[in-house]
């Protein structure tokens, strides 16, 4: 019983970490959020990319809690459930990273084009 509870708590923490990002409450910094050269160079890109990442983290954490509960009720072996849970978490966080990175690049290009048009 300790394993599912531990996994649920870590997934809840993941979702909670996404809330300030989604609410655009985290200013540019070098510790927390989507930190790429594009996001650190432009405040608009920072907040937009991190808001998306925050929403994705909330969705991922919530989905992972659901996955963990389903795995628990399927009565899989502890190692099998852990493998599925960790694999799903790694795939989900990879997706969040790729989506955030691509969004930051796209927004940065759009901002650069706006600046060039207005100049």
Image: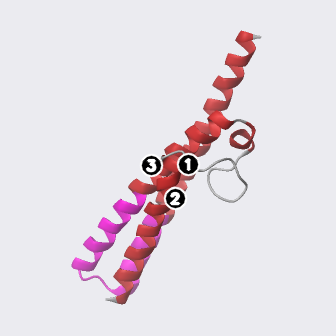
Image position of 60 with respect to 41: above or below: below
Q: Quadrant of residue 44?
A: top right
| Mark 1 residue crowding within 10 angstroms, few (<14) / some (14–19) / many (20+) | few
Query: Disc 1 designates what residue?
Result: 25
Tell me if residue 111 is in the magenta stretch: no
Q: Are marks 2 and 1 in contact (CB under 8 Å)?
A: no
Q: Give the farthest residue toward the left.
A: 73
Q: Quadrant of residue 76?
A: bottom left
Residue 97: percent from the left, percent from the top? 57, 51
Q: Verify CB contact (< 8 Å) between mark 2 and mark 3.
A: no
Q: Position of residue 36 (x, y in %)?
A: 71, 46
Q: Is residue 48 above or below residue 55?
A: above
Range covered by the magenta-colored residues: 60-89
Q: Main secondary structure of the magenta part?
A: helix
The location of residue 116, given as percent across then percent down, is 75, 15
Q: Which residue is mark 2?
A: 93
Picture quadrant where residue 9 is located = bottom left
Asked if the magenta segment contains residue 76, the reply would be: yes
Residue occupied by mark 3: 55
Residue at far bottom of view: 1
Q: Judge by depth and name the residue closer to the eye, 75 or 1.
A: 1
Q: Quadrant of the N terminus?
A: bottom left
Res 80 visible: no
For discs 2 and 3, the disc positioned in front in the rendered view? 3
How many other residues sit within 10 Å of disc 2, few (<14), some (14-19) or many (≥20)? some
In this picture, residue 38 sits left or right of residue 2: right
């Amino acid at each position: 019983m300790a394993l599912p509870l531990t996994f649920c708590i870590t997934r809840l923490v993941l979702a909670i970490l996404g809330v300030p990002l989604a609410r655009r409450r985290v200013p540019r910094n070098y510790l927390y959020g989507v930190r790429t050269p594009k996001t650190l160079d432009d405040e608009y890109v920072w907040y937009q990319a991190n808001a998306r990442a925050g929403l994705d983290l909330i969705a991922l954490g919530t989905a992972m809690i659901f996955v963990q509960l389903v795995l628990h009720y399927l009565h899989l072996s502890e190692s099998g459930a852990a493998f599925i849970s960790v694999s799903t978490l790694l795939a989900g966080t990879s997706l969040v990273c790729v989506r955030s990175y691509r969004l930051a690049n796209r927004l940065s290009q759009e901002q650069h084009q706006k600046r060039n048009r207005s100049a």
